[in-house]
Image (cartoon, grey):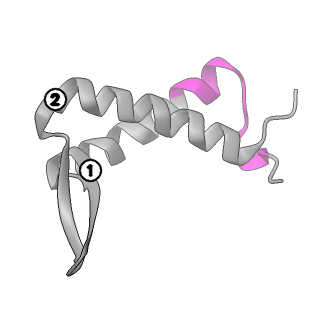
Amino acid sequence: MKVDKSDFMELVSDITTMVVIQRFGEDTFEEVKIFEWHYETQFTEDAQDFFNEQYDVIETMIANKLKINLDLLASV
């Protein structure tokens, strides 16, 4: 089975985001002023750190379970 790298990364990111939201609840996101008239929603610093840690754990878990060699993922 051929797995597209961007699809795999999106799946891992979506699952990791769900885990982060469950962990941090209302403290998951913050509004950050980018320009005087433009704000963006992003993870809080603690939520981002947790996301980064969990992403690697979840990525490895899925790859191992499905026997996917991460170095050989196909890029489209």
Residue 30: where, in percent of width, then height? 17, 52
**Which mark is on residue 35?**
none
Residue 16: where, in percent of width, then height? 40, 33
Instruction: Kindly identify the residue that appears in the image at 26 percent across and 30 percent down.
Output: 21
Between 46 and 42, which is closer to the camera in this rendering? Answer: 42
Q: Residue furthest bottom?
A: 36
Q: Is residue 34 above or below residue 46?
A: below
Q: What amino acid type is highlighted by mark number 2?
A: Gly
Residue 67 belongs to magenta span? yes
Q: Is residue 10 left or right of residue 40?
A: right
Please name which of the two marks, 1 or 2, marks the residue nearer to the observer.
Answer: 2
Q: Which residue is mark 2?
A: 25
Q: What amino acid type is highlighted by mark number 1?
A: Gln
Q: Is residue 43 above or below residue 64?
A: below
Q: Is residue 18 above or below residue 72?
A: above
* Start-end of magenta stretch: 61-73
* Spatial CA span between label 1 and label 2: 13 Å
Instruction: Kindly identify the residue that appears in the image at 16 percent across and 29 percent down.
Output: 25
Instruction: Kindly identify the residue that appears in the image at 78 percent across and 42 percent down.
Output: 4
Residue 12: where, in percent of width, then height? 53, 35
Q: Is residue 65 left or right of residue 60?
A: right
Q: Quadrant of residue 3?
A: top right
Instruction: Kindly identify the residue that appears in the image at 35 percent across and 48 percent down.
Output: 52
Q: Which residue is mark 1?
A: 48
Q: Is residue 35 left or right of residue 18?
A: left
Q: Quadrant of residue 18?
A: top left
SS assignment for the magenta stretch, majority:
helix
Callout 1: 10 Å neighbours few (<14), some, many (20+)? some
Q: Residue furthest front?
A: 37
Residue 63 belongs to magenta span? yes
Between 62 and 6, which is closer to the camera in this rendering? Answer: 6
